[in-house]
């Protein structure tokens, strides 16, 4: 009898895991809490709990030759650096091509994963899931957790004395979707990561006075402390 494998998440790594399990003669079941595949690459207008979040303009920062699955290249007419909408379409093509959808249970949240009482003998796990208010339990021989690492934002507010009295708005790049929110405002972007750079550029087109500093720069901290009392301002903290 084929070994049963539970896969948590139907993003890039989750889809690859399903494919590899099928190739090895295993029986994979993938649990995806949302109603579609794609993980990080599925853009939504609102931040969803438990999922990584994209802004509308995100483009892959590695070329398509390095980003594709080894046995399924991107279409030739795709740009070298792929916009998120086309990346998602590519993942759907991959899933359809290898018939992976049959293994995915959408709108199903994994609530708990625990070792079975006889784990030392069987090596099996109990997985409890929730779908449309109904909780179910199943036994698996292996677990593959494919939920990514960009779900929980790092927002070090303790590093910014006075943040509690700041009269403007501040948020992490996880909450950012469109540059319209910066229109005619003074904007400070903290961070030199990919998202910080992208957002600083987008803000520069609409903001009254966009500024960007390295997160450990004393100049940045002094700027924050000088301008904390000013309303009609927006602070953004980069993912890094």
Image (cartoon, grey):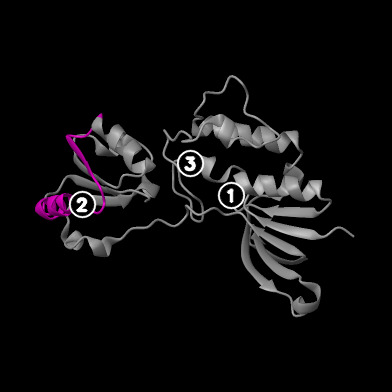
Separation of residues labelled 1 and 3 (CA atoms): 11 Å
Q: Earlier in the sequence, mark 3 or mark 2?
A: 3
* 9 over 36 or under it: above or below: below
Q: Earlier in the sequence, mark 1 or mark 3?
A: 1
Q: Which residue is mark 3?
A: 44
Q: Closest to the observer: 30 or 180?
A: 30
Q: Position of residue 132 (x, y in %)?
A: 64, 57
**Residue positioned most to the right:** 1
Q: Earlier in the sequence, mark 1 or mark 2?
A: 1
Residue at 40 percent across and 56 percent down: it is: 153
Crowding near pointer 2: few (<14 within 10 Å), some, many (20+)? few
Quadrant containing the N terminus is bottom right
Q: Which residue is mark 2?
A: 217
Residue at 44 percent across and 41 percent down: it is: 45
Residue at 67 percent across and 45 percent down: it is: 15
Check if residue 227 falls in the magenta segment: yes
* Numbered disc in front, either 1 or 2: 2
Separation of residues labelled 1 and 2 (CA atoms): 39 Å
Secondary structure type for disc 1: loop
* 140 over 30 or under it: above or below: below
Check if residue 5 falls in the magenta segment: no
Number of the label disc, if any, that sits on residue 34? 1
**Residue positioned most to the top:** 77
Lateral position of residue 228 relative to residue 70, left or right: left
* Numbered disc in front, either 3 or 2: 2
Magenta stretch in the rendered image: 205-229
Mark 3 in CB contact with mark 2 (< 8 angstroms): no
Secondary structure type for disc 3: loop
Q: Position of residue 36 (x, y in %)?
A: 61, 43
């Amino acid at each position: 009898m084929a070994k049963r494998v539970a896969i948590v998440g139907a993003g890039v790594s989750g889809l690859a895991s399903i494919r590899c399990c099928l190739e090895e003669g295993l029986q994979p079941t993938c649990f995806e809490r949302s109603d579609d595949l794609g993980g990080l690459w599925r853009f939504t207008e609102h931040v969803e709990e438990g999922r990584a979040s994209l802004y509308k303009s995100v483009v892959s920062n590695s070329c398509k030759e390095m980003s594709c699955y080894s046995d399924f290249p991107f279409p030739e007419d795709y740009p070298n650096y792929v916009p998120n909408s086309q990346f998602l379409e590519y993942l759907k093509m991959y899933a359809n091509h290898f018939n992976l959808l049959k293994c995915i249970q959408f709108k199903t949240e994994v609530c708990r994963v625990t070792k079975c009482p006889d784990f030392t003998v069987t090596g099996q796990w109990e997985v409890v899931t929730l779908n449309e208010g109904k909780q179910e339990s199943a036994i698996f021989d292996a677990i593959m957790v494919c939920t990514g690492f960009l779900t929980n934002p790092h927002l070090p507010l303790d590093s910014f004395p006075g943040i509690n009295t700041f009269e403007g708005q501040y948020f992490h790049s996880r909450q950012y979707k469109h540059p319209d929110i910066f229109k005619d405002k003074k904007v400070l972007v903290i961070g030199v990561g990919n998202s910080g750079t992208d957002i600083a550029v987008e803000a520069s087109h609409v903001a009254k006075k966009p500024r960007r500093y390295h997160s450990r720069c004393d100049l940045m901290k002094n700027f924050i402390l000088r301008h904390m009392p000013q309303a009609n301002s927006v602070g953004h903290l980069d993912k890094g």
